[in-house]
Amino acid sequence: MDLPRPELALVPRPRRVSTRSGRFRLDGTTRLRVTRGAEAAAKLLRALLAPATGLRLQAAADGAFVLALDPALTGLGDEGYGLTVSPKGALLRAARPAGLLRGVQTVRQLLPYEALSERPVRGVPWELPAVEITDVPRHAWRGSMLDVARHFQPVSYLRRYVDLLALHKLNVFHLHLTDDQGWRMPVAAYPRLTEVGGRRPESMAGPAGSDRFDGVPHVGAYTRAELRELVAYAAERGVSVLPETGVPGHVRAALAAHPELGTDPARRLDVWTRWGVCENVLGTDDHVLDFFRTVLDEVMDVFPSPYVHIGGDECPTAEWERSPAARARAAREGLPGPRALHPWFIARMAEHLVRAGRRPVVWAENGVTLPLDCTVMSWREPGHGHAAAERGHQVVHTDHRATYFDYARGHGPQEPPAQPGAVVDLRAVYGVDLAPPTRDPAAASRVLGAQGQLWTEFVRTPAHIEYLTYPRLCALAERVWDGTSGWRDFAARLAGHRARLDALNVPHADPPATVPVPPRVGGLR
Ligand code: ACM
């Protein structure tokens, strides 16, 4: 199948593309000229193309395919690149290594879609169309979150997940590592976190409030070596892994392992088998803060990401209101009451990260109670993100109505069980609100970008992950990379891009059109 021209069905769309006549053929004689600093891009290009094409792309000083790092190039930023293909050769240039990695993905997309196959393909001429591309992303933060706490996924799958992010020029893989229903992050000082917190005897069948359980144990945790290997694998693809170990709510698995962290140390809790918002939260004594500082030290040791996520969402305060120790802590800290222990706790964790040179990220609303060095993920309303940016926070848009892929893709009864709430169809994702909050350029510059979210209460398998993620993540990737071409142009390119998803065995069928049913209100967890 010939992909449509002139737009070449590239997803996301490059900033500027002009097509020329002719093609450059890659074959067993094609050599790469790799300038200093471009070695990682050459390695990635070879790794991506070898399985289907068998091309070796050996290095040679007179190679017709040039990968060049040129720090003197201007206007390309950290991730931009230029690509010129003529019948005689190809030149991929960037000012920074990450730009070359993005350009490698464009080269891959310009080849016949069979080049993306994981198996050898014979009889396809591996030709690049002659083209001139200059490409720079609009947004610096282009992410995707996967919840591996509710349902664990092995690192072997996470590598594929990262590959698919990189194909779409996404650059942040947000790994949600801990929650009420499971603790997956190894912490050497506290092995019970994964030994006890990494397993639950069964899971609720159906949405929050259901009285049915599946009777199936669920177990899983990573080793440090696995996570380090994942970080390195992602880095080779220009993807940063953002770890999240959330506090002070969503901690029931930690409380099961360490009851002394709770508001009632004598109480024994199990790892939660239910879905919904759990009322158990962390205690506020010094030893609890110290425990989670140690957790964050371990997180920072494994994950070099400049950003570290500390949760912060859905923290009921009833336990603090009942707890004499928490009330006394609030009074000692001069807080107006136990509710204010929530931002107080987050601020303590945030300052620990900042002291270590990292940037804390928090699920939050307008950020009104948070230190300004917290980056806000505004998940309830886009307006919260705008307000937070105006206050001085960096913001990543994560509006649930546009970016939550655990919400159904369509209205039809054939859709698998999903988070009750709004339908998030492809157009809703494409419509994600990235508008700068005001005409104030400083506030606008604090809007870093957006990311998709997949919470996995109902999602056990990689196949289901991908069913929910694609093609919605393609729409998000398009919006955060360029996002100026309009829906019709994107839809036309997506039609061609689907051949690539097929070659990678990624499901992408749109749900059949059905009569919309009114969304249920109050659908947030
Ligand atoms: C969230 O959806 N609880 C961030």
Image: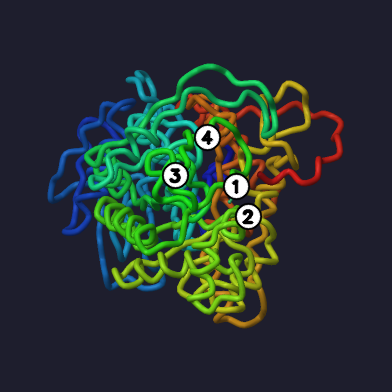
Instruction: Quickly name the residue at label 2.
Output: 318
x and y percentages locating residue 52 in the rendered image = 33, 25
Residue 345 versus residue 190 in the image, above or below: below
The type of residue carrying mark 3 is Ala
Q: Residue at x 36, y 24 (%)?
A: 118
Q: Residue at x 41, y 51 (%)?
A: 261
The Cα–Cα distance between marks 4 and 3, rounded to whole angstroms, is 18 Å
Q: Residue at x 58, y 38 (%)?
A: 4
Q: Are marks 2 and 1 in contact (CB under 8 Å)?
A: yes
- Mark linked to residue 272: 4
Q: Are marks 4 and 3 in contact (CB under 8 Å)?
A: no
Question: Quick one: 327 or 155, which is closer to the camera?
Answer: 327
Q: Are marks 3 and 1 in contact (CB under 8 Å)?
A: no
- Of the two numbered discs 2 and 1 on the same chain, state the one appearing first in sequence: 1
The Cα–Cα distance between marks 2 and 1, rounded to whole angstroms, is 7 Å
- Mark linked to residue 467: none
- Of the two numbered discs 4 and 3 on the same chain, state the one appearing first in sequence: 3
Disc 4 element = loop
Instruction: Quickly name the residue at label 3.
Output: 266
